[in-house]
Amino acid sequence: MIFVTGGAGFIGANFVLDWLKQNDEPVLTLDKLTYAGNLANLASLEGDARHAFAQVDICDRAALDALYAEHRPRAVLHFAAESHVDRSIHGPGAFVQTNVVGTFTMLEAVRAYWSGLAGEAREMFRFLHVSTDEVYGSLGPDDAAFSEVTPYAPNSPYSASKAGSDHLVRAYHHTYGLPVLTTNCSNNYGPYQFPEKLIPLVIANALDGQPLPIYGDGSNVRDWLYVGDHCTAIRAVLAKGRPGEVYNVGGWNEQTNLTVVKTLCQVLDEISPRSDGASYATQITFVKDRPGHDRRYAIDARKIERELGWRPAETFETGLRKTIEWYLANGEWVRQIRSGEYQHWIETHYRNRDAAHPAKEGA
Ligand code: NAD
Ligand code: DAU
């Protein structure tokens, strides 16, 4: 069986659901169920004997040891993290705790377990660490995209804590020979993404008739990848990646935030028009920028294509449409989240972000 940490979150849940669609190898999901973890994401697996869930904090070594002893996994996919840049600016402590101390604790538990394996079980064991392109810092408009040898230059508490975790993972391979794999991926979007992140926030706010907040002038660039493509990349790295190697994963799809939001509005106008006939783009509002906001991310994903034959299957158009259709069909999932702790976050984070210059209709 495999272990998936953070499997009740956005990418982890997509991964678990995809995994069990592709094969019957059982999964144990390990998740603390923070504000971002949601068992409803895995509800379709209820009663499925191939899936089990353990509520556990990745900083809890004793709990991890007990799970390894009981289940003896052949691989661990490590998604669990504090993942939102804005929250890391408001409160960096949890990011250091989970992303650095938690990953360290995972590595120690895995090292103890793997050291006790012999023969093929030891040979074939893998620890796959899911990381981010943000560890490479920020690019200028004409800079080459991030490759696996781009020096680390993290700029937010989130990316610094992820960079710390990447370094620990690397060191456990170099020092102890632990068979690790690391993926550094660009911005994901798709079903089950918590509506604090740009794309689900904009979809939910648009449908609720609320402002669509764009930081600064909206010209920051991200490289967007549909979450299902990230899942296939991770499966490819797990199956065929070389231990100790890093694989960058990206969508070959750089977009400014303003383009992303306008495209979302266009698709919504088409498939779920406002009752007054106006475009959702009239709700766009420019707000105070994120402190230290990285200008541009871009991933050079040639290594994973060359070595493992992976390329994204979705285009931005097909992926966005699928995503919007999922949010339209899952209004109750969104409502449940937006009625809880989420309200407090939105109040705290957006209340004092004065609108800078509301966009004109059709902007
Ligand atoms: P998410 O915030 O949606 O989910 C994180 C999950 O981890 C939640 O289920 C949460 O309950 C769990 N978790 C948090 N702290 C924990 C702890 N101490 N112990 C156990 N579980 C804990 O995050 P996501 O967007 O799904 O990201 C998953 C991983 O992918 C993260 O490592 C993130 O850095 C990385 N990543 C994300 C993106 C993206 O665009 N979302 C892109 C590249 C890489
Ligand atoms: O690049 C990979 C990273 O992508 C992951 O490692 C992170 O876990 C994930 O959260 C994401 O980070 P970003 O900060 O890029 O994602 P976010 O959705 O928060 O923001 C995307 C862009 O949109 C960014 O430039 C900030 C901007 N933005 C975001 C919000 C929430 C806005 O303009 N308005 C908003 O309200």
Image (cartoon, rainbow, N blue to C red):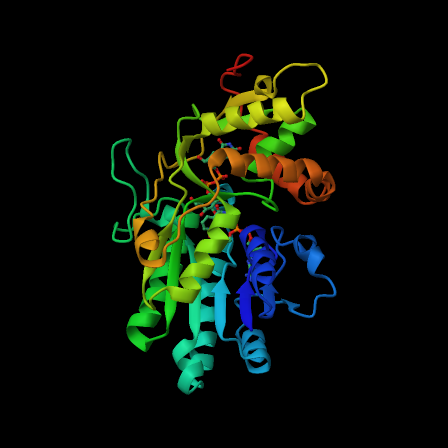
| 23 or 112, nearer to the observer | 23
Q: Which residue is situated farthest in the top direction here?
A: 360
User: Does any portion of residue 161 appear in the rendered image?
Assistant: no
Residue 262: in sight, yes or no?
A: yes
Q: Quadrant of residue 272?
A: top right
Q: Residue at 64% x, 40% y: name it.
A: 326
> Is 351 situated above or below 314?
above
Residue 113 in the image: state x and y as whole percent: 47, 80
Quadrant of the image containing the N terminus: bottom right
In the rendered image of this protein, does residue 129 appear above or below residue 49?
above
Say which of 78 and 290 sits in front. 78
Provide residue 153's location: percent of width, then percent of height. Answer: 30, 47
Q: Which residue is more in the foreground, 200 or 338?
A: 200
Foreground pick, 92 / 220: 220
Across the whole image, how many numbered discs are drawn on residues?
0
Q: Looking at the image, which residue is at 54% across and 21% down?
A: 285
Specify the quadrant of the image occupied by residue 121.
bottom left
Counting from the top left corner in percent of width and height, residue 105 is at 47, 70
Q: In percent of the image, x 34 and y 69: which residue is there?
A: 243
Residue 101 place in picture, x, y as percent? 45, 64
For image coordinates 40% across by 86% down, the residue present is 119
- Report whether 228 appears left or right of 48: left
Considering only vertical position in the picture, is 181 above or below 277? Answer: below
Left/right placement of residue 331 relative to residue 141 reads right
